[in-house]
Amino acid sequence: MGHKVHPTLFRTQVIYTWPSRWYTRLGSKEYRDFVQQDVKIRKFIRKIGKEAGIDQIKIERDHNGDVSLQITVARPGLMIGRGGSGIEDLTKKIEKDVLDGKRKVRISIVELKKPNLSAHVVGQQMANEIEKRMPFRRVMKQTLERIQRDGGALGARVIMGGRLNGAEIARRETLSWGKIPLQNLRADIDYAHSEAYTNFGVIGIKVWVYRGDVFQQKRD
């Protein structure tokens, strides 16, 4: 039987760092609360910024427990809004709905230079296209073509599973290009899992993007 390991977690502290950066006593109630808040914050932001193409959400906390968020997005204008109104509304919603008004939130937006090299952005684009009833084979093929055209990637793989094109029996389809060295710890492989909600059920989408090897300088 194969052993399935998350590519990002497998390489954490080797070429990647943790997306959450804060400190508190392990096993304390504050530790549990902070972990739950981080999960809720990420789910909330990805739901709100679905069309913006969110890549990374980095969370930091100061000694008071106040939260600093750095959000990397493909289309920052959709997140920032006119005159910064989008950031203000998002800050208020997180403070009120997620943190119950107990913590302050600061948000900074960073533009993603090459969105087609981000597995999260690519997976969300595929989910949006499937929800618009585009044929899944065309979506998979066009996705790999965009990754190749953008440059910087040495390989990619996409997998879709579910009732594809409304079929009665669920199945899984795979399409790949180049190489994906999953056992090499130096390999910079971006991985993401997305879901497309259709009238026939949920379509699962997995994306791997191989962006070369990292030898000396660690990558965030």
Image: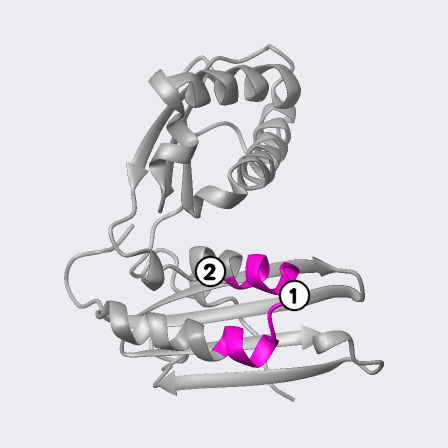
Residue 24 tag number: none
Disc 1 marks a residue whose amino acid type is: Arg
Q: Is residue 74 left or right of residue 90?
A: left
Q: Position of residue 69 (x, y in %)?
A: 40, 29
Q: Is residue 133 highlighted in magenta?
A: yes
Quadrant assignment, res 172: bottom right
Q: In the image, what residue occupies the spot 65% across and 89% down?
A: 1
Which residue is label 1 attached to?
A: 133
Q: Position of residue 59 (x, y in %)?
A: 43, 33
- Give the mark, 2 or 1, whose residue is nearer the N terminus: 2
Whether 143 is drawn above or below 77: the answer is below
Residue 186 visible in the displayed image: no
Q: For the magenta stretch, what is the residue range?
A: 126-140
- Residue at the limit of the structure toward the bottom, as seen here: 1
Residue 9 tag number: 2
Q: In the image, what residue occupies the spot 49% across and 27% down?
A: 24
Q: Is residue 169 left or right of residue 50?
A: right
Q: Is residue 110 left or right of residue 93?
A: left
Foreground disc of the pair 2, 1? 1
Q: Is residue 116 left or right of residue 137?
A: left
